[in-house]
Image (spheres, coloured by chain):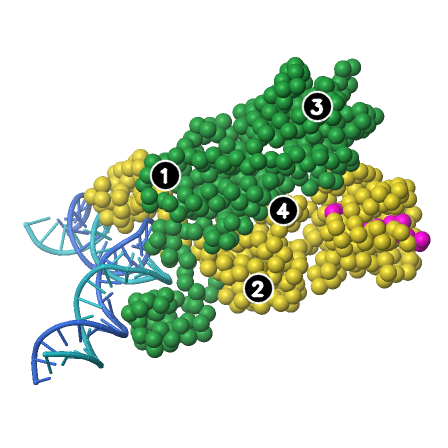
Chain colours: A green, B yellow, C cyan, D blue
Amino acid sequence: MKRQITIKDIALKLGLSTSTISRALKDHPDISPKTRAAVKELAALLGYRPNRVALNLRNNSTSTIGLIIPEIEHYFFSAIINGIEEVAYKNDYSVMVFQSNESYKREVINTQAVLTNRVDGVLVSFSKETKDFSHFQKLIDNEIPVVFFDRVIDELQADQVVADDYQGAFLAVNHLIEKGCKRIAHFAAPQHLAIGKSRLSGYHDALLRHNIPFDQSLVVLADTFETARKAAHDILRRPDYPTGFFAVNDMAAIAIIKEAKHLGLRVPEDVKVVGFENSRSAAISEPELTTVDQFGFELGREACQQLLKRLKNEEKNTEFKPIKKVIKTRLVVRSST
Amino acid sequence: MKRQITIKDIALKLGLSTSTISRALKDHPDISPKTRAAVKELAALLGYRPNRVALNLRNNSTSTIGLIIPEIEHYFFSAIINGIEEVAYKNDYSVMVFQSNESYKREVINTQAVLTNRVDGVLVSFSKETKDFSHFQKLIDNEIPVVFFDRVIDELQADQVVADDYQGAFLAVNHLIEKGCKRIAHFAAPQHLAIGKSRLSGYHDALLRHNIPFDQSLVVLADTFETARKAAHDILRRPDYPTGFFAVNDMAAIAIIKEAKHLGLRVPEDVKVVGFENSRSAAISEPELTTVDQFGFELGREACQQLLKRLKNEEKNTEFKPIKKVIKTRLVVRSST
DNA sequence: GAATTTATTTCAATCGATTGCACTTTAACA
DNA sequence: TGTTAAAGTGCAATCGATTGAAATAAATTC
């Protein structure tokens, strides 16, 4: 890489000191108009751009945000990244992306990487495997602002931004009931994840609200296409198979539809299905999937905005009070119900 | 943010100089075993981690790669990012992501941002809007290694990593012909993009190979769901509508299927469709979409590897010879043909 | 015991930009 | 013609880590 032009180069050519150049470039009132003009002209001519790395060192800040995320290759997360990048861009921050691949071990390494890279703040959605959170606690102990999104945990003293999972689940199941379903199954996410718990709880409460008894045998752990397809196969071959399905995400929901059709059942006539996410696939599936929109883009934006707010208020040493932001969800009714 | 432990802190507590600490930590032979042990112990105790920013400044390198990409929220690109991050991670590089949102203006700003952030190298897939490439030329003039992927241009003296678009298109159209299609339409990407040109050319040559005349009226510019749906509507209502469709990407292909079904045509009996990408949606569509897998993950990996190779060979001042790497594609036959 | 190695450790400069303070002009005033 | 204020620049330290060269301490040799 070519040596970049520095303030020193300009100083040398103009026979001035580096201090003068520095001040001239930032319109310091001490510098005479003549000098200022000369400096600016030469700087432009040489294509000078301040070395951010040097500034980072001096200011002890990098204008960079670290993002730790399970997997980029997932519609919901890429929508979130999109929202994050949008806000970062508008505020002149850069985003460093670290992918955990749903691996706890790699996530721990990621937290070290953000520390090493001296990012100003970190946005985190942790992996499914993660049950110990001390690596995040270390970030917090280092007083690096951290905002958790989507996958969150209350034990950590940190801000959270989440979709209203409970509300979304409630809406979804309520909708199924209104459409006439009496027996409704839930394909759930692991219960150590807040999203798993909240969506189950929304499902549970919607049933009770309509005096439908909660049946544990209708709750299955299945949050991927493959596991859901298998589970759907089993459950749909029971004589008393459920006629309504609420899946924790769109891929699981689509797997249910596929399997139902495969078994000769009609959707939505025989079986109704609701997903969660409103991914691109939801609109493609046949029939098109009724689903809960969790506004990934907005969620990413909010998370980033919350982090930036913390970064700006860093000096103020008032007591830290974690903020939990909940993004309302919305039921998108399509032809699968 | 809390002040991080520095080498100075350790030096002070141990009554040694910073040079000694520095050398002790990196097992320099000059340092006595006693001192070395003491230093390492205290460093571990205090949780010392070297300040990467300071090192960056000194070494004039950041171990960071800049990634400029049209839109993250697109299966193909997120797969590529995944591959890039994978290779970067294994080589202790970090990835800074800049999204152009298919906007030329923003892309120009992005190139400035990677310069400012002093990344060691840049990976680029440019926006659809981009027709002037001087902002990339500026990167190259600054001798920052740049590797273009997917959307590339030959005018720039830079490495390229692309899918074998010509081969993929040829395979796809050949397949349609073998399945009995006589009239085959092509939904194309803008022709100023190499992918647009190559895929059209593969389509063209496959037709000629089977002595089917090329018919310009069967080539439509439509590379998004909406435009493709509209175009499909028009073309399928012609009395002599084509029975085979080769779309430049999966979303366009799926739009064709949707529209065909909407018009009462059966897929694949009346109309056969092939896409390009092998996105997640391809497996979800009904019928499942025959498509060309362009191995986004591998493409990202190769692009990153090529960039890292350049970064390692930077000293060697041999003449620069751009390398073009072509990733073979593969036809994935499903039930839409 | 003096001279000479050898083993340790420190000094000081460097990377690029910033900034409080000191210094030199020049202008203004009495 | 001093005296003083104002304007414009430069000096030097700083951020954290590294490293060639110099300096000190300890060990060895004659």
Residue A206 covered by magenta stretch: no
Tell me what residue is drawn at x 51 percent, y 64 percent.
B143
Q: Nearer the viewer, residue B200 or B42?
A: B200
The type of residue carrying mark 1 is Asn
Mark toward the start of the polypeptide (4 vs 2)? 4
Range drawn in magenta? B239-251
- Tell me the distance, in whole angstroms, between the alpha carbons under discs 2 and 1: 39 Å
- Tell me the distance, in whole angstroms, between the alpha carbons under discs 3 and 4: 33 Å
Rate crowding at label 1 as few (under 14), some (14 to 19) or many (20 or more) other CA atoms within 10 Å.
Answer: some
- Residue ID for mark 4: B73
The type of residue carrying mark 3 is Ile
The type of residue carrying mark 2 is Phe
Q: Position of residue A78 (x, y in %)?
A: 60, 43
Tell which tag, 1 or 3, sits nearer the viewer: 3
Mark number, residue B112: none
The type of residue carrying mark 4 is Glu
Give the quarter of the figure containing the N terminus of chain B: top left
- Residue ID for mark 3: A177
Q: Nearer the viewer, residue A231 or D2?
A: D2
Question: Does label 3 lie on the same chain as label 2?
Answer: no
Mark number, residue B136: 2
Residue A203 falls in which quadrant of the image? top right
Rate crowding at label 3 as few (under 14), some (14 to 19) or many (20 or more) other CA atoms within 10 Å.
Answer: some
